[in-house]
Amino acid sequence: MLSAWESPFVHQLLAADDINLANTPRADAWVVLYPFLNKLVLPAGVGDMAHNRPPADVHLIATKASLVVRSNLHPAIQYLLLEAAAEIHSSPGVFRRAGQFPAAESIDMPLSPHARQYYKSGAPFLQRHLPFWLAVLVQQLIVVLIPVAGLLYPLVRYTPSAYDWAMERRVFKLYEEMQSIEERLAALDSKPHAVDEVLAQLQRLDRRASSLPVPVSFRPRLHSLRSHIHFMRANLQRSSKV
């Protein structure tokens, strides 16, 4: 028959005059030879103080019960089991102090990482402050969002720089065309058709610069480019009239 100390049948057996609880000889030796055993002492009179039952301290040996789960059991269920074990077994008893059990003791099985974390800092923050189903849902969302955030962070971090680089390339391309026109203008003869062709290029470049969509920070560059175009076009027009 296996029963807990709180069982009324155990108390009836301890209080019975014609039944004696057997003392375990060499209990300390058993514990040394077999570490999974524990020595317990049942104090005299704890069963019946009036009749001093048992009449003397009784040395016993016992094993500690282990709560074993599969390694792939969901962490949230493991925390629930640990909380239930603490609620049931944390109260004091004849063989235990208050809060002694459950305990982080691995006898023949490795301690779960989640159990180790529970004994270190308690249940997770979400499970302490949210309903169980909501805490599990939020934890799953966090697990999904962390790698997504890891992928999005470089995009968010470098997208503005990439955009600025692309805008600079568009503006610099116009400046390169402007430089090409200036080099051609330096070697230009005074023939009317050659001047008209350069003026047409400047006109096209000016239209492209005026219609180019750029952020506010790039507008001074375009304004400077267009001012230079207008200056060159005015000079060419004056020189062609002369």
Image (cartoon, rainbow, N blue to C red):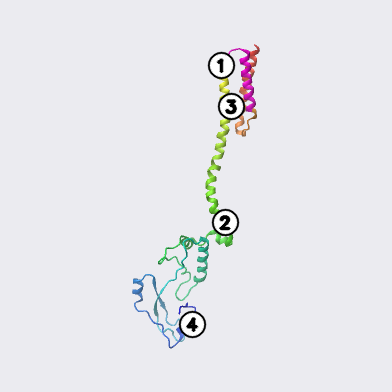
Callout 4 touching callout 2 (CB < 8 Å): no
Q: Label 3 belongs to which residue?
A: 174
Q: Earlier in the sequence, mark 2 or mark 3?
A: 2
Q: CA distance from mark 1 to mark 3?
A: 19 Å
Q: Label 1 belongs to which residue?
A: 186
Q: Earlier in the sequence, mark 1 or mark 3?
A: 3
Q: Earlier in the sequence, mark 4 or mark 2?
A: 4
Q: Label 4 belongs to which residue?
A: 9
Instruction: Say few, some or many: other residues with alpha carbon within 10 Å of mark 2 (under 14 / 14 to 19 / 20 or more).
Output: some
Above or below, comparing residue 177 to residue 122 in the picture? above
**Amino acid, disc 4:** Phe
**Amino acid, disc 2:** Val
**Main SS of residues in magenta:** helix
Instruction: Say few, some or many: other residues with alpha carbon within 10 Å of mark 1 (under 14 / 14 to 19 / 20 or more).
Output: few
Q: CA distance from mark 1 to mark 4?
A: 115 Å
Q: CA distance from mark 2 to mark 1?
A: 70 Å
Q: Which residues are magenta?
A: 186-209
In the image, what residue occupies the spot 54% across and 45% down? Answer: 153
Residue 19 is left or right of residue 216, and the answer is left
Which residue is most to the top? 242
Q: Label 2 belongs to which residue?
A: 138
Callout 2 touching callout 1 (CB < 8 Å): no
**Amino acid, disc 1:** Ala
Between residue 209 and residue 73, name the one nearer to us: 73
In the image, what residue occupies the spot 52% across and 47% down? Answer: 150
Q: Earlier in the sequence, mark 1 or mark 4?
A: 4
